[in-house]
């Protein structure tokens, strides 16, 4: 790669250290403040200092906002570095483990130059895919936050009103939330009429409403409060209602994201490929699409996707010692997407279910078995992605039979 200067950046909270090294070996260091104006002014200063040629910028992965800001300059070649790689490089040179921002910036610059031919240059997807990626990642963040609030609600009810979890389908149930909005304690619920509860259950399309209401009133008659301490019941019920209100907001915002994702997904060029994957559905299909992107030159082999996503295992060998274990460093959201898709495909794809059962019989844990299924799926999806073809289950099953795979007999069974 032809370059005129290399920059290593250690991105912090307010001040960011950098080191610039020219092709002639000259080196200088500095600091740029975190405001948008100063960052872009600093980049323009680099161009003024080096008016011709490409400037290589090495920075740690995970600095998404910085990559987004720098990707708008066509004279910059951005090279994201795995934080574990930069940490290992620093520790190999400084056994004491000492670290500082200026030193880290210099080491990132050195690491980038020494491994320039091996590191992958950042190639952004087209705007539609980048927007879709941002939407599905943020949606997942909101879902995780909603899940955390749901766990808090469950924990709080167990402290003062555990019967509600049993009577109204658990902490994730919208019916439970509707009940808690009106009657957050056992004493309050005992004051409700059969007509009121019947109306709420019917609004939630509960089956066998008359029987459920009759059972509920019998259960309430026999129920014993976990505690009668007003200090605990009053404060806990107030917090439970606050959690219900926050969960309602999360539902509303996640619905908005679902609508935005549907709009972007409807016109995505690879929609037919990933929607054809059994078990993907409207949530996972867009996530699979952004995991691969639309740049067909980004990955040349399926193994690159398997390793980068953390699905492929790591083998360590030394003498007679041999160990195979899961990868530790990978893009979390991408890893989750493949893992969750593989799990969702089990009820729909006979070979995937057979592969999962085979791994469990060999002693693998649940998640290890799911990763093994995901490993196979990535090879299939990679080929479909490269050739722009929809998934055909018969094609893969025929290929398994041709290779005399042990899965074939299990599929037939």
Image (cartoon, rainbow, N blue to C red):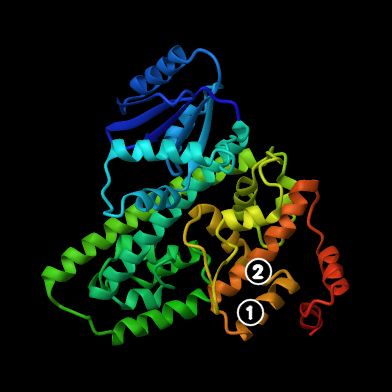
Residues at circles 1 and 2 in contact by the CB criterion of under 8 Å: yes
Indicate the quadrant where residue 309 lies: bottom right
Instruction: Looking at the picture, tell me which residue is in the foreground, 35 or 242.
Output: 35
Locate residue 371 relative to residue 202 in the image: left or right.
right
Which residue lies at the image location 27% right of the left edge and 56% below the top edge? 242
Circle 2 is placed at which residue position?
Answer: 373
Instruction: Looking at the picture, tell me which residue is in the foreground, 285 or 162.
Output: 285
Residue neighbourhood size for the residue with mark 1, other residues' Cα within 10 Å, grouped as few (<14), some (14–19), many (≥20): some
Which residue lies at the image location 87% right of the left edge and 69% below the top edge? 398
Badge 1 or badge 2: first in the primary sequence: 1
Disc 1 is placed on an element classified as helix
Locate residue 42 relative to residue 310 in the image: left or right.
left
Compared to residue 183, the image places residue 108 above or below, namely above
For the question of whether residue 59 can be seen, the reply is: yes
Picture coordinates of residue 347 (x, y %)?
67, 72
Disc 2 is placed on an element classified as helix
Which residue lies at the image location 47% right of the left edge and 27% below the top edge? 70
Instruction: Looking at the picture, tell me which residue is in the foreground, 158 or 265.
Output: 265
Picture coordinates of residue 121 (x, y %)?
57, 37
For the question of whether residue 323 can be seen, the reply is: no
Compared to residue 153, the image places residue 211 above or below, namely below
Q: Mark 1 to mark 2: distance in Å?
A: 9 Å
Picture coordinates of residue 181 (x, y %)?
32, 60
Quarter of the figure with the N terminus: top right
- Mark seen at residue 381: none
Circle 1 is placed at which residue position?
Answer: 359
């Amino acid at each position: 790669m032809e370059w005129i200067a290399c920059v290593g950046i250690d991105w912090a909270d307010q001040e960011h250290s950098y080191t610039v090294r020219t092709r002639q070996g000259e080196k200088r260091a500095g600091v740029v403040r975190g405001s948008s104006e100063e960052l872009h002014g600093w980049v323009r200063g680099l161009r003024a200092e080096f008016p011709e040629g490409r400037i290589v910028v090495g920075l740690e992965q995970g600095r998404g906002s910085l990559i987004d800001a720098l990707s708008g300059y066509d004279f910059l070649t951005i090279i994201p570095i795995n934080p574990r790689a930069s940490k290992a490089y620093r520790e190999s040179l400084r056994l004491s483990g000492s670290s500082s921002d200026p030193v880290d910036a210099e080491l990132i610059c050195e690491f980038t130059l020494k491994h320039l031919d091996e590191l992958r240059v950042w190639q952004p997807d087209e705007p539609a895919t980048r927007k879709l990626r941002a939407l599905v990642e943020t949606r997942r963040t909101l879902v995780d936050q909603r899940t955390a609030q749901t766990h808090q609600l469950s924990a709080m009810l167990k402290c003062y009103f555990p019967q509600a979890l049993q009577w109204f389908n658990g902490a994730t149930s919208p019916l439970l939330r509707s009940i808690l909005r009106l009657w957050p304690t056992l004493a309050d619920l005992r004051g409700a009429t059969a007509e009121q509860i019947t109306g709420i259950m019917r609004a939630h399309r509960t089956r066998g409403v008359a029987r459920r209401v009759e059972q509920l009133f019998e259960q309430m008659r026999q129920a014993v409060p976990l505690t009668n301490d007003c200090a605990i019941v009053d404060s806990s019920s107030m917090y439970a209602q606050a959690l219900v209100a926050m969960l309602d907001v999360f539902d509303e915002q996640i619905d908005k994201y679902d609508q935005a994702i549907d709009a972007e997904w409807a016109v995505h060029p690879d929609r037919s490929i990933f929607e054809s994957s059994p078990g993907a559905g409207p949530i996972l299909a867009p996530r699979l699409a952004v995991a691969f992107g639309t740049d067909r030159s980004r990955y040349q082999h399926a193994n690159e996707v398997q390793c980068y996503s953390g699905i492929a295992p790591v083998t360590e060998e030394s003498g007679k010692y041999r160990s195979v274990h899961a990868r530790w460093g990978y893009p979390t959201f991408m890893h989750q997407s493949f893992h969750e898709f593989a799990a969702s495909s089990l009820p729909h794809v006979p070979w995937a279910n057979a592969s999962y059962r085979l791994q469990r019989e060999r002693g693998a844990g649940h998640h290890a078995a799911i990763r093994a299924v995901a490993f196979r799926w990535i090879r299939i999806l990679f080929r479909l992605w490269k050739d722009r073809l929809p998934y055909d289950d018969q094609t893969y099953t025929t290929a398994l039979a041709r290779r005399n795979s042990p899965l074939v007999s299990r599929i037939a069974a």
